[in-house]
Amino acid sequence: METFIAIYIFVLAAFTGYEVISKVPVILHTPLMSGSNFIHGIVLVGAIIALGFADTTLEKTIGFIGVLLASGNAVGGYVVTERMLEMFKSSKEND
Amino acid sequence: MTSVEIIIQSSYVIAAIAFVIGLKRMSSPTTARAGILLAGAGMLLATVVTFFYPGLENFLLIGAALFLGSLIAGITAKKVEMTDMPQMIALYNGMGGGAAAAIAAVELFKDHDLHVSVVTLALIGGVIGSISFSGSLIAFGKLQGLIKGSFRFKGQNLLNLIILLVISIVSIFIIFELGYINNPVMIIFIVALVLGITMTLPIGGADMPVVISLYNALTGLAVGFEGYVLQNYSMIIAGTVVGAAGTLLTQLMAKAMNRSLANVLFSGFGDTSTSESSDGTKGEMKPIEASDASIMMAFAQKVIVIPGYGMAVAQAQQKVWEFCQLLMERGVEVKFAIHPVAGRMPGHMNVLLAEAGVPYDFIFDADEINQEFKSCDVALVIGANDVVNPVARTDPSSPIYGMPILDADYSSNVIVVKRGQGAGFSGIENSLFFLDNTKMLYGDGKAVASDLVQSIKEL
């Protein structure tokens, strides 16, 4: 049954992703790609769990690389997106 | 469920909600900033509670990896120039793919009984993650200029197909022979990494944004699959949302560039067309001085600026914006027209203009502004080339035929700022430059923009 719950979640999440993006203006494509890139940085959570339960040296080494890469994804993705979006201002705002 | 587990799981739910709402907010310029802040808060919460996961060990290793990864990424992300943004996104995305592959590897190497569905999804996610990892690194190398040329060779599609076949066969072996696991897993990951490289190397620089976007979607998918492996629903939701959103974004980009995704992945661009450069464009290019150009615009009613990546390379955007502000002070209506693929990736030019301080309500998409060129006195093309080439409308034999362009040629006058006489990124001659109402303003973008500012101040 767990498997079918996962499939439901998968299908609904896919629709959500499609809907959320469908009306985005071109001007935001780059920041949005960067933003969605940040969001899959949630892989960090998985990487921490993988390393946290690793036993052998091989598992620990791969797990370490996993956490290292995942934190790079999350932090780099966040900083870059934030930097880009911070600059978007309307002419009506503080100019 | 213990109370700790309840807190952890509810935090994951909150994080998933924050991601979806954050992504939604990021799709409008007024709320975009709030969107990333919200998603960031969700990520922080999810990461912190994970440390309280029952039975978790190796805290020292986790802390060290987390610190190191955050430090390196944080510093590079703060430093990177806005012009180099696309390749940095590729790099961080590749890291995410690599992390998903690492999770798959740890779980598969581990000595525990996994259900067939778990092994299958771990493998698929791991393969996709590995492809995204090595492919994104190649994309980074290409855009950064570390890897030059497109390395096309005969039978590359066949080679990729064979590699994919090897992966499938070894995967089936692993899935159904659970007892004998270690070496085949290693083979799969290595071969998948190779596939990412052989898939990406032949793709030209102009198509890279589409590829980066595709790898972004793939990483999302890989994260979603590994979420299933770890029974972590926040990973399934966030990964799948990005996978779906990324796929749509990839399609939108490919459409804006008038390329199908299959076309991008399986054939080169430009390579076939370099020989036919001397076709049909007649007449000569007429030069103009900066002072004359500036007078022309100062007494115009409406000026539309069409910036391209060349302007950003020359770091001219601040000066151009200064010039536009001076024009506006004189009562000239100024608008910026952005082609979807201006810059290195769709929307990249908007980021570069925003950096220079241009408010986003002066910036218009091709669809919004193309009607206005007919009533426009001067179209100032600076650093753009292929995106204003009328050949895309008129010449079916041109490789860019059918690509949506900005109709600069419909305006009464066109001023093209250009370094010298030569074809654009794609190597295609631009017939706009030879029109009667087009004047060429030669020089480096920044120097020209400074000259324009100078001469308008002297008026």
Image (tube, coloured by chain):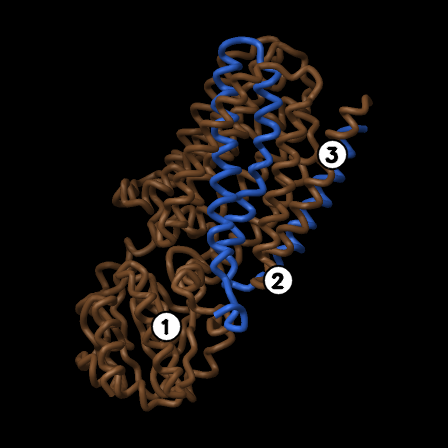
Q: Are discs 2 and 1 located on one and the same chain? A: no
> Eyeballing the image, is B118 above or below B298?
above
Name the colour assigned to chain B in the rendering. Answer: brown
Using the image, tell me which numbered label, if any, was put on residue B242: none
Tell me the SS state at disc 2. Answer: loop
Q: Do marks 1 and 3 share a chain?
A: no
> What percent of the width, then of the height, locates residue B143?
33, 47
- Of the numbered discs 3 and 2, the one sitting upstream in the chain is 3
Q: Which residue is mark 1?
A: B306
Q: Which part of the image, by quadrant, shows the N terminus of chain B?
A: top right
The residue that label 2 is drawn on is A23
Residue A6 numbered tag: 3
| Chain A rendering hue | blue
Horizontal side, residue B125 vs residue B254: left or right: right
Mark 1 vs mark 3, CA separation in Å: 48 Å
Residue B131 visible in the displayed image: no
Quarter residue B297 falls in: bottom left
Q: Position of residue A88 (x, y in %)?
A: 50, 62
